[in-house]
Amino acid sequence: MQLDRGLYAPLIVEDPAESGGYDQDWTVVLDDWLDGTTPDDVFVSLRVGTSMGPMNTTSAVLGGDAGDVRYAYYLINGRLPTAPAAFTAQPRQRVRIRFINAGGDTAFRVALGGHRMSITHTDGFPVTPIDTDALLIGMGERYDVVVTLGDGVFPLVALAEGKDATALALVRTSAGQPPPQARPKELDGAVIGYDTLHAIPTAALPGRPVDVEHRLDLTGNMMSYDWGINGRQLDLSPNVIRQGQRVRVSFTNTTTMYHPMHIHGHTFQINGNGPRKDTVIVLPRQKVSCDFDADNPGQWILHCHNIYHAEAGMAAVLGYEQ
Ligand SMILES: [Cu+2]
């Protein structure tokens, strides 16, 4: 749970084969920040269901419960909305923005006032570019967008989904006052879904039949805080795969809360021709398939990227047969 103590930093890997085509390159780290408590105390209170525990918020975008933890602050690049990070550029410059959700229990909906964003990558893999008003980013997910900037001062907002709080940064291409902290209309515009994102051919898995499928039900609930997989908590008996196999991990969410599921050691393509990723939000009552080629022998954990769910036991092991 060190993530909620601030143990994180962005690591950007440049692709020498990429053409670039932008004037500025900004990294935007979103976070939910505890104050006056520790992740360990939060976890204890979640387990025993004290008043510091579940907050019973819901989100239409997330299809149910939005989170378990009440945070003191929601930050962009470590700063509060009252003293926001400011990015500066020239009007009409093209900017690549790399969004990273480093939160522990918060999905963020992000938008840049006065602009639409062209999504170019998720979790480091290129997608067929597609424009959107707003973007939902689960814990552990990353998105890259390219934006051609207008002339003025614009709010870059990250709504803590379902938690009635917003993180803020400013994008400045000319002198002037920042806008009043109104909610930009883009935040309530269309939110892109995975079904409209597609890996470009060089990032897609080559077509071939699936050799082995592991069906993993996401289970548990907020009141008993018994988050698990197939009804078990941190079951270390491996879901067996063999080197060279095309593997499908199918997540079915039986709970009333979303889970950003993250697989170590591999990257996967979701729902057949979807984006290539390493972390995927599974909404309540939804099923998501994650296909990959077994090319990295070892014992690999997969887990919910809600750090308190992972701590409660929403984790399992993919193990290569010896
Ligand atoms: Cu979860």
Image (cartoon, rainbow, N blue to C red):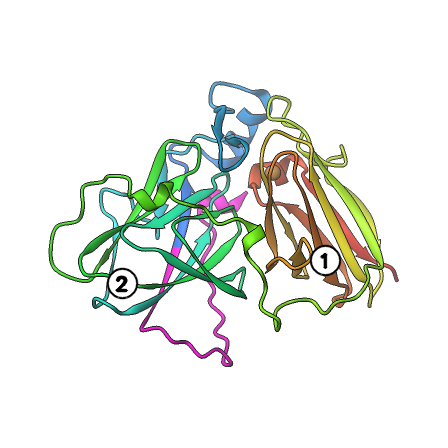
In this image, 171 relative to 203: left or right? left
Q: For this view, does 149 lie left or right of residue 103?
A: left
Circle 1 residue: 291
Q: Amino acid at mark 2?
A: Leu
Q: Main secondary structure of the magenta part?
A: loop
Secondary structure category for the residue under label 2: loop
Ligand 1's image quarter is top right
Q: Nearer the viewer, residue 315 or 152?
A: 152
Residues at badges 1 and 2 in contact (C-beta under 8 Å)?
no
- The response on whether ligand 1 sits within 8 Å of label 2 is no
Q: Which residue is located at x 28 percent, y 43 percent? A: 184
Mark-to-mark CA distance, 1 and 2: 37 Å
Kindly identify which residue carries mark 2. 149
The crowding category of the residue bearing disc 2, from other C-alpha atoms within 10 Å (few below 14, some 14 to 19, many at least 20), is many
Of tags 1 and 2, the one toward the viewer is 2
Label ID, residue 153: none
**In which quarter of the view is residue 144 placed?**
bottom left
Q: Quadrant of the N terminus?
A: top right
Determine the residue located farthest toward the right in the rendered image.
Answer: 322
Picture layout, residue 64 above or below residue 184: above
Q: Is residue 31 left or right of residue 183?
A: right
| Label 1 packing within 10 angstroms: few (<14), some (14-19), many (20+) | many
x, y percentage for residue 110?
39, 48
Which stretch did the figure color magenta?
1-28
**Residue 287 in picture, x, y percent from top left:** 69, 42
Q: Position of residue 45 (x, y in %)?
A: 53, 25
Q: Answer with left or right where residue 252 lies relative to residue 75.
A: right
Residue at 48% over, 77% down: 18
